[in-house]
Image (cartoon, rainbow, N blue to C red):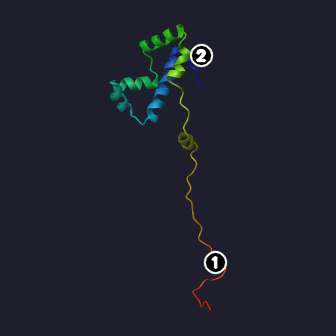
Amino acid sequence: MNTLHSIGEVQQAKVLGTRLAQIRIRKQLTQQQLADLAGLGLRTVQRLEIGEVSTQLVGFLKVCRVLGLSGRLDALIPEQAESPLERLKQQEAPRRRVRLSKPSAPAVAWSWGDTR
């Protein structure tokens, strides 16, 4: 687990970008859809997600550090826990079909014989 207040501002930007991308993917949005909904350009969203450093973002993170707010960034954009589906995909276990066994023959043959 990355604690944002213990790393530098450039690394913080990268961690926050990764977290944003994970949240976007979980919400099943493309980068273009997110950009449109946020009123941003596609390239801006791409830059945010790769943590490309801008002077404004690094400046903001430095101000947060000085004001003692860096520890709160984890609450703002929390680290995403891996979903069970993601864990299964990483295991890459071969899928198997369930095969039903043929019903076994009854021990005594049954018939509509006489019931006298």
Q: Residue under circle 1?
A: 106
Residue 11 in sight from this viewpoint: no
Q: Residue at x 42, y 12 (%)?
A: 56
The kind of residue on which mark 1 rests is Pro
The kind of residue on which mark 2 rests is Ser
Which mark, by number, is residue 6?
2
Q: Nearer the viewer, mark 1 or mark 2?
A: 1
Q: Residue at x 55, y 10 (%)?
A: 68
In this rendering, is residue 56 above or below 20?
above
Q: Residue at x 59, y 16 (%)?
A: 6
Q: CA distance from mark 1 to mark 2?
A: 71 Å
* Crowd class of label 2 (few under 14; some 14 to 19; many from 20; radius 10 Å): few
Residue 87 in sight from this viewpoint: yes
Which mark, by number, is residue 74?
none
99 and 113: which one is in front? 113
SS of the residue under disc 2: helix
**105 relative position to 77: left or right:** right
**Of the image marks 1 and 2, the number of the one nearer the N terminus:** 2
* Horizontal and vertical percent position of residue 69: 53, 13
* Crowd class of label 1 (few under 14; some 14 to 19; many from 20; radius 10 Å): few
